[in-house]
Image (spheres, rainbow, N blue to C red):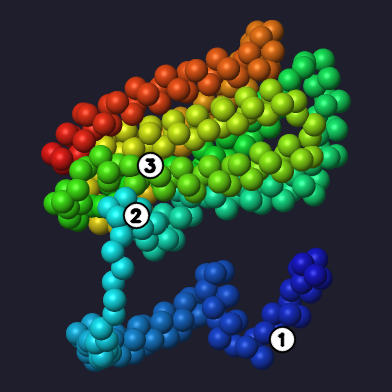
Amino acid sequence: MIQTLLSNAAVYGARIKGAAYPVYLFGSVGVGNLRASVIVSAAVAVLFGLMWLLLSRSFLKITTSTGKVIRREYREKCSRQRSIDVALLSRGFSRFTASPNYMLNCGLGTFLMPLCAIVVLWKGGALFEMLDAMFAETAGSVPLLICVVLCGLASMNFMTAPSVSLEGKCLWILQSLPVEHWKIFQAKIRIQLLLTSLPLLLCIVCTAAVYPLYSLQLLMILLFAGSYVWLMALVGLFLGVKMPTLTWTNEIMSIKQGAPVVLTLFGGLGYMVLLFVGFMLLPGWMLGFCGYMSCFVLVNLFLSVWFYLWLRKKGVERFSGL
């Protein structure tokens, strides 16, 4: 079509000039036609003036008008009493589900892990056969890859990292509640644990149903995944308390651009790269899958205990002074 247009440019130009003269004038401006430039500029000026006139008459009316106020009739309802932990957890879930940006950017793993489980059940058999053939010389490589992929998906969940920053100027409401600040931390951690551990457990169960894992291998995957999810929740909250952004004008600043979010996301993915490289390229494979993973489980537990104790004491104090 382009070749036909170029070879018959004169014919098509004449047709456009006769049937759509404004389009012809607009195109003539591009080749330096002075007469077409003056006509098009005059038309743009007239349209600009017309738009200016319309806006000058309607702009103030539009910007100063108030929306319709819906009057609602008050109806008395019974409120069920709940415990402090349940109330704080419900508040956290409401905050999470009320923000599409929060769910999409900090909870993507919750949506991807069930999809991964479905794909494993559907195509996992052929995929695992291919991986077994590729890594036949290195025992334990496939279970390690399973662990890296699943925990990599879990790394996309970091609800605790921006949770303090998202309070913004309303942080004083949380600080003034008649509850221990540690309970507020617990609620934030539990939200990430629930939204991450349950989909991750579903992926592990579906993988075990397709790929023949030994009992000890399955146990090590469960221990590492559980300790990793716990560690990432604590790390995210630790960074959120240490580097909060409370003066944002749009919540997307704390969700996408905050230092806690960036460090938690890339730190978790980097940890998975280290896990893979240490086994496949470094002498980690000499320990065997179970021996290698047990070392990382111990590291996860040690770091988790350290972050937990920091949040329990210094973290609570720092949160109170924000």
* In front of the other: 141 or 15: 141
**Height in image: 158 above or below 92?**
above
Q: Callout 3, which amino acid?
A: Ile
Q: Is residue 191 left or right of residue 214?
A: left
The quadrant where residue 99 appears: bottom left
* SS type, badge 2: helix
Q: Is residue 55 left or right of residue 214?
A: left
* SS type, badge 1: helix
Q: Residue at x 30, y 42 (%)?
A: 185
Image disc number at residue 86: 2
Q: Is residue 251 left or right of residue 115?
A: left
**Height in image: 198 above or below 219?**
below
**Image spot of residue 77 (x, y percent):** 29, 80
Nearer the observer, disc 3 or disc 1?
Answer: 3
* In front of the other: 217 or 275: 217
Q: Residue at x 64, y 45 (%)?
A: 202
